[in-house]
Amino acid sequence: MKVHVLLFDAGSDSEGIHSLEMAGKTVVLLFENPDDAERYAGLLEAQDFPVPSVETMARDDVELFCRDAGYEARFIESGFVPSSKEERQFIAPPEANLDVTNWKTDEAISEGSTTQSDPEAAPSPSTAESSEELDALRKRLEGLL
């Protein structure tokens, strides 16, 4: 059976899969209906989230990937109707998203570089400048709201 998943930078070295953090678990959504996946991607885009592409894959392959990565695969069938507040996130992304600015830096982290999240690492001048730039950008964006 084929399912539809949301991928960021599909086919590149920095490819990532969309997931939700729910009750301490990482959940990957597997949509039966491609229109549902496209709608979810559009909702992410409306929240200024990086725009994912909808990719069709074998359900078994995605579930194996999730199992190996310690993720939970959730199949969203056509016509799915949520029965809880938690399940509403399967048809519409949460209003608050996790910071995704560093999802592409996982490769750098695995190669031994330090990040600002390492409490032992002192921020480099470029990191401090980047932080100041991000703060200034946040203030400008808040001003637009």
Image: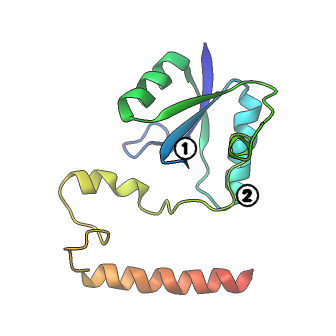
Query: Quick check: can you spot residue 1?
Result: yes
Question: Disc 2 or 1, which lies upstream in sequence?
Answer: 1
Q: Looking at this view, is 44 or 69 the one in front?
A: 69
Percent across and percent down for residue 132 are 43, 86
Residue 108 horizontal side relative to residue 138, left or right: left
Mark number, residue 79:
none
The structure residue drawn at horizontal position 36% and vertical position 43%, both measured from the top left corner, is: 13
The structure residue drawn at horizontal position 59% and vertical position 45%, both measured from the top left corner, is: 52
Q: Which amino acid does label 1 sit on?
A: His
Q: Distance between the residues labelled 2 and 1?
A: 15 Å
Query: Quick check: can you spot residue 9?
Result: no
- Rate crowding at label 2 as few (under 14), some (14 to 19) or many (20 or more) other CA atoms within 10 Å: few
Q: Looking at this view, is 52 or 59 the one in front?
A: 59
Residue 118 versus residue 25 in the image, above or below? below
The structure residue drawn at horizontal position 50% and vertical position 33%, both measured from the top left corner, is: 72
Q: Which amino acid does label 2 sit on?
A: Ala
Residue 30 versus residue 108 in the image, above or below? above
Residue 132 horizontal side relative to residue 8, left or right: left
How many numbered marks, from 0 up? 2
- Rate crowding at label 1 as few (under 14), some (14 to 19) or many (20 or more) other CA atoms within 10 Å: some
Q: In which quarter of the image is the C terminus?
A: bottom right
Percent across and percent down for residue 120 are 19, 74
Percent across and percent down for residue 62 are 49, 25
Q: Quadrant of the N terminus?
A: top right
Mark number, residue 46:
2
Residue 46 versus residue 63 in the image, above or below? below
In terms of secondary structure, where does tag 2 sit?
Answer: helix
Percent across and percent down for residue 114 are 22, 66
Place residue 113 in its image quadrant.
Answer: bottom left
Q: Name the residue under label 1.
A: 18
